[in-house]
Amino acid sequence: MKNKYMSFFSGALGLDIGLENAGLEAVSYNEIEKKFCKTIRANRPDTKLYECDVRELSAEKLMSDNNIKKGELFLVAGGPPCQAFSTAGKRKGLDDDRGNVFLRYIDLIEGLRPKYAIIENVRGLLSTPMKHRPHNQRGEGFPPLSVEESAGGALAHILKRLENAGYTASFTLYNSANFGVPQVRERVVIMASRDGKNIPYLAKTHSDKDDNLPPWKTNRSAIYDLMSRDDLQHTEFPEKRLKYYRQLTEGQNWKGLPIELQKEAMGKSFYSGGGKTGFLRRLAWDKPAPTVVTSPTMPATDLCHPEKNRPLSVEEYARIQTFPDDYKFIGKPVDIYKQIGNAVPCLLGEAIGKHLIKFDTNTLENFNTDGNLSRYLNTDHISWYENIKKESRRF
């Protein structure tokens, strides 16, 4: 089944659009969210969709339903729910119920035994423990953290599972802007090979530096032509925030207000630490967007249009995530924001798909050797292992 793959945690198909544009063909999708499934059916009515919790699926059922044998698939791809690993959450890792679906996904990879596997997740996966110990039960008077309770324990467990199943895995943190996406969105991508070959890191196609690559795409390049449309779908900011936005120009945030208005707008947060750069944030025309989230009106992650006094529209969201203009999103704007905000940018998915196909056919000429593809250090698998060894001596 050359270039056939199965998709799990498919969402609104951002990763899948990219993989399919690269030349891969989806055998089936899997998604539990009903509103997401309506979007999948509207765009891919002829592809089998498993609308259920991934824990209800087994490799045996999937192979039987789709008339495939173990080891026939080219690829299994998916991004298990990231909340359990997000630095913004409680980070219970694999103790979290959502974390457990991650292990179910590994079970399916083991059972289906594709030639390759892709696992996409948030940066927090790099440092989340497998088991969470409350902070009030750490330190003096308590036993030291176990391997499972240490930073990076969840990822270490996942990698060990893949290794035991015969897969060689490489990973790093990728900034989507380096692949033609007009957005600084950073995600861990694990690529695993069944044949014992180490898959190299993707080569950048765009750069914010002068290194003979096209520059990063900007908001202007992505959404400026939508300015003339009056039919865009969007939610609204409350008036108490609009009063401040009216005084901010493109590229500014709350720090662009007069000092007294800064204090008024931020309240007690004004005196707290941190940059708080997501508050009252009006996008800059000539930079990539920050990460588009599941709502553009959350107070700490506002995404205001560079000129207009409104949040980004769903159409602008879709452009920034590199969805095709003719892609159909089903639901109210609040539902569509969530679908787009949860997606892998299509162009990043395409870069991953092309990379795997070239690797498989021994035609891969351009690749990155140091894994330095984001704003953060020690996020590639080689540096990550070295750091883990130094800090916890777990290996």
Image (tube, helix red, strand yellow):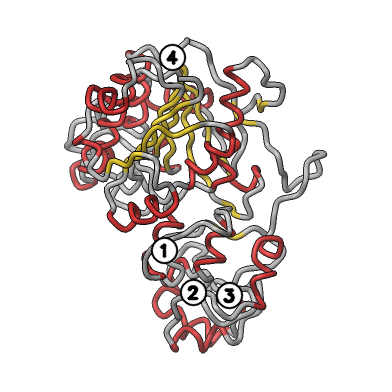
Q: Amino acid at mark 2?
A: Gln
Residue at screen point 56% across, 33% down: 352
Q: Position of residue 239 (x, y in %)?
A: 44, 88
In the drawing, what numbered circle is on residue 336? 1
What is the number of the mark on residue 194?
4
Depth order, front residue of 70/335: 70
Q: Please give the label number shown on residue 233.
A: 2
Q: Sequence-wise, which precedes: disc 4 or disc 2? A: 4
Q: Amino acid at mark 3?
A: Lys
Residue 364's disc number:
none
Q: Residue at x 53, y 71 (%)?
A: 312
Left or right, 167 with reference to 2: left
Q: Are marks 1 and 3 in contact (CB under 8 Å)?
A: no
Compare marks 3 and 2 and give the one earlier in the sequence. Answer: 2
- List x then y, in percent, for residue 66: 32, 27
Question: Nearer the N terminus, badge 1 or badge 3?
Answer: 3
Q: Quadrant of the C terminus?
A: top left
Of the pair 189 and 359, the residue shown nearer to us: 359
CA distance separating discs 1 and 3: 30 Å
